[in-house]
Image: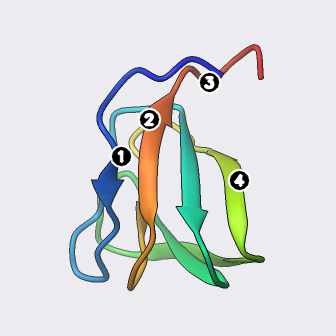
Amino acid sequence: MRVIGATENLDASTTKFKTVGAVWVYKAGVLVLTVRNAADDADIGVITLPAGGHIITLGTGEGLRANDGTGTPIVASGF
């Protein structure tokens, strides 16, 4: 996994990682992510992840929101 940006705290009201193809997300407990569309005006879906770190791949312009947890942009291939 190759890191390409700084770790950011996820937020429920701000869409993050709209310009990257993949994100390493982490939370010590269950993490509920909302995936937003490229226009950032609608939810695409919700992903519930168990505790720990996980790779999420995103389509062009898509982004993530969550009440808590962190995300780090990574290279979208070779993982």
Q: Indicate whether 62 appears above or below 35.
A: above
The Cα atoms of the two marked residues, 4 and 3, are separated by: 13 Å
**Lower sequence index among marks 4 and 2:** 4
Q: Quadrant of residue 42?
A: bottom left
Left or right placement of residue 25 versus residue 11 in this view: right
Q: Nearer the viewer, mark 1 or mark 4?
A: 4
The Cα atoms of the two marked residues, 2 and 1, are separated by: 7 Å
| Residue denoted by label 3 | 76
The Cα atoms of the two marked residues, 1 and 4, are separated by: 15 Å
| Residue denoted by label 4 | 54
Badge 2 vs badge 1, beta-carbon distance below 8 Å: yes
**Lower sequence index among marks 1 and 4:** 1
Q: Secondary structure at mark 3?
A: loop
Please tell me which residue is depicted at 72% across the width and 75% down the height of the picture.
Answer: 51
Tell me the tag on residue 17: 1
Tell me the tag on residue 73: 2
Picture mark count: 4
